[in-house]
Image (tube, helix red, strand yellow):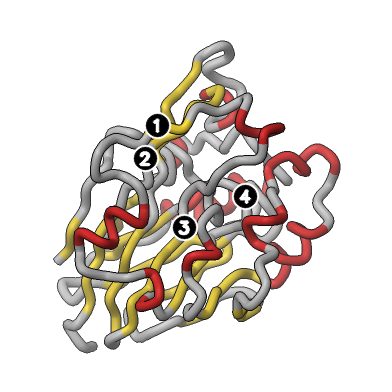
């Protein structure tokens, strides 16, 4: 396996939400500053971005969430600091199409977007209880090149897309195999916080609870794993190798 792979966690800021949306059956009444953490992977010369953070929310959503971005935070600023322009991103992987994971898809006009086929279908016609989680103008962007994936998919020699449904029907996580045998596991919202993996606690926003628990167990079974939790605001930096 080629050693030419690197992983860097980015920070698109934070947004407030009821913490009970992150873990099922807990934290009622608590407001949490959830981190927005896209991840940049370089593999086989490809610049791969996992999730695109949060765009400008429409008013019906903005009144429920406060977006916090400190100096030098925000996806564009973080990429700029690395000398990368949005048009230089080759691939975007959307773990799913909730508004806080695809909010800046429109910036990456030259990228191919890898999303599970079932997720894109559902995003256009979600169940009523999930409708507010999707903002159509974030993913339904003219000119974006969606590559529809069905199940496990090896993106490069190092990067595997792993179906982890439950939070949504077409949710996927990303596993990056490092040369030393460790696996960086970008959980997405299959595991929003550390306790989801460590205690098998499912997310608070759910399409199917049984599928969500199976997906957590799938993530837990990965050996030599370094887990990235989508909204944990404690783990904000990672640069590997």
Q: Reading the chain from its start, which is encountered first: label 2 or label 3?
A: 2
The alpha-carbon separation of the residues under discs 3 and 4 comes to 11 Å
Q: 241 left or right of 50?
A: left
Circle 1 residues within 10 Å: few <14, some 14–19, many ≥20: some
Q: Name the mark nearer the viewer: 1 or 3.
A: 1
C-alpha separation, residue under disc 1 versus residue under disc 3: 16 Å
> To which quarter of the image does residue 132 belong?
top right
Q: Earlier in the sequence, mark 2 or mark 1?
A: 2
Percent of width and height locating residue 182:
23, 65
Q: Quadrant of residue 97?
A: bottom right
Q: Residues within 10 Å of mark 4 (few under 14, many from 20)?
A: many
| Alpha-carbon span between mark 4 and mark 1 | 19 Å
Which residue in the protein does label 1 denote? 68
Residue at (40, 76) in percent of width and height: 87
Disc 2 marks which residue? 13
Quadrant in the picture for residue 150: bottom right
Q: Which residue is mark 4?
A: 98
Percent across and percent down for residue 101 are 53, 52
Q: Earlier in the sequence, mark 4 or mark 2?
A: 2
Q: CA distance from mark 2 to mark 3?
A: 12 Å
Q: Earlier in the sequence, mark 1 or mark 3?
A: 3
């Amino acid at each position: 396996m080629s050693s030419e792979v690197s992983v860097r966690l980015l920070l698109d800021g934070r947004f407030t939400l009821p913490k009970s949306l992150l873990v099922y059956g807990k934290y009622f009444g608590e407001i949490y500053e959830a981190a927005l953490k896209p991840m940049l992977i370089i593999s086989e010369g490809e610049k791969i971005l996992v999730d695109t953070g949060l765009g400008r929310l429409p008013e019906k959503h903005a009144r429920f969430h406060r977006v916090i971005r400190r100096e030098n935070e925000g996806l564009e600023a973080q990429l700029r600091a690395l000398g990368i322009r949005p048009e230089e991103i080759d691939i975007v992987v959307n773990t799913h199409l909730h508004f806080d994971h695809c909010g800046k898809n429109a910036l990456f006009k030259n990228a191919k977007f890898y999303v599970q086929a079932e997720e894109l279908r559902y995003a256009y016609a979600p169940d009523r209880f999930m409708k507010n989680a999707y903002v159509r103008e974030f993913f339904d962007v003219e000119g974006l090149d969606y590559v529809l994936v069905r199940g496990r998919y090896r993106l490069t020699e190092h990067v595997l897309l792993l179906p982890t449904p439950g939070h949504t029907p077409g949710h996927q996580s990303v596993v990056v195999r490092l040369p030393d045998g460790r696996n960086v596991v970008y959980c997405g919202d299959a595991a929003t916080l550390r306790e989801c993996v460590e205690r098998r606690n499912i997310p608070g926003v759910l399409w199917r609870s049984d599928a969500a628990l199976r997906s957590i167990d799938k993530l837990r079974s990965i050996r030599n794993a370094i887990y990235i939790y989508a909204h944990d605001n404690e783990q904000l930096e990672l640069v590997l190798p």
